[in-house]
Amino acid sequence: MYIDSHVHFDRFVKDGSFATLLENAKEAGVLEMVAIGGSPEANALSRRLAEEHPGRIFGCAGYDRDLATESHDLAELREFVADPLVKAVGETGLDYYYTAETAAEQKTLFNENLALAVEFQKPVVVHSRDADEDTIALLKDYSNAWNGAEGRLGVLHCFTRDVKFARAVLDLGLMISFSGIVTFANADPLREVVQYVPDDRLLIETDSPYLAPVPMRGNRCEPAYVVHTAKRLADLQGGSVESLANLPAQNARALFAL
Ligand SMILES: [Zn+2]
């Protein structure tokens, strides 16, 4: 069985395709999913879905970088993170590709999320784009402050960078998650990174509704497609697709305490 460690459910719920998504996922063997938060609305939806689908959908709540320059209610986020249905803080992090001009505010918000992760000893789901150095700097402080279980610090989601960044993330004790990007034609450099990630630090995700893997490109991505990413990772590692299903599922279970 597979666990999709990173799903944005809002559009599926809005357009009425959520039940079909669950059916398709079940048929593909994707039995568990983490519903990613990032805004007050996404956090509320994540907790609601976790409540309605126990053992199948797990909650996650955070404030993502696009809230950095808007007012955001940290007391409300704190309540979400404290909820036992919420297994992780996120997604949150830094994106200098789209909005480098708000770097200072993004760092402040990221730190506020990290402080909650430390306080509640829940892992953080990190987004990082074109912000390697600052991400590592902030995660270093986080790693030093962490007093939760070993191996449960968090995950760098939708990894697209190089070996150097992967090593830095792994050295700090976080996991690395690969999305459908690893199947894209132009992703040879990323496929090289895969072999540097130890078996017990590897997660897989779809980041639905984005980034549908080959051969489903052009479709809206959904959790059932995580199978294609697992298959590609299995090819790269010379293992069976079964082992590549179970390993990341085990890791996700350990990381999020599912
Ligand atoms: Zn995401």
Image (tube, rainbow, N blue to C red):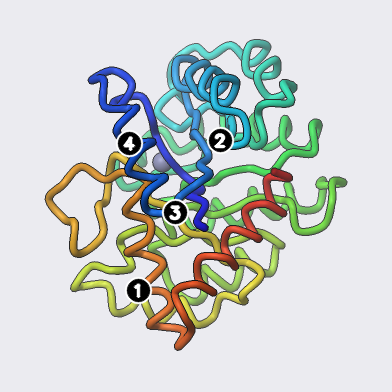
Residue at 54% in and 52% down? 134
Q: Is mark 4 within 8 Å of ligand 1?
A: no
Image-quarter location of ligand 1: top left
**What separation in Å lies between label 1 and label 4 (alpha carbons)?**
22 Å
Q: Which residue, given by chain and number where applicable, does mark 1 sit on?
A: 232
Q: Earlier in the sequence, mark 4 or mark 3?
A: 4
Q: Earlier in the sequence, mark 4 or mark 2?
A: 4
Residue at 69% in and 43% down? 258
Q: Earlier in the sequence, mark 1 or mark 4?
A: 4
- Amino acid type assigned to the residue bearing label 4 in the image: Leu
Disc 4 or disc 2, which is closer to the eye?
4
Q: Secondary structure at mark 4?
A: helix
Horizontal side, residue 163 vs residue 11: left or right: right
Up-down: is 187 above or below 112?
below
Q: Secondary structure at mark 3?
A: loop
Q: Which residue, given by chain and number where applicable, does mark 3 sit on?
A: 29
**What separation in Å lies between label 4 and label 2 (alpha carbons)?**
22 Å
Q: Which residue, given by chain and number where applicable, does mark 4 sit on?
A: 21
Disc 2 or disc 3, which is closer to the eye?
3
Residue at 59% in and 34% down? 58
Q: Which residue, given by chain and number where applicable, does mark 2 sit on?
A: 90
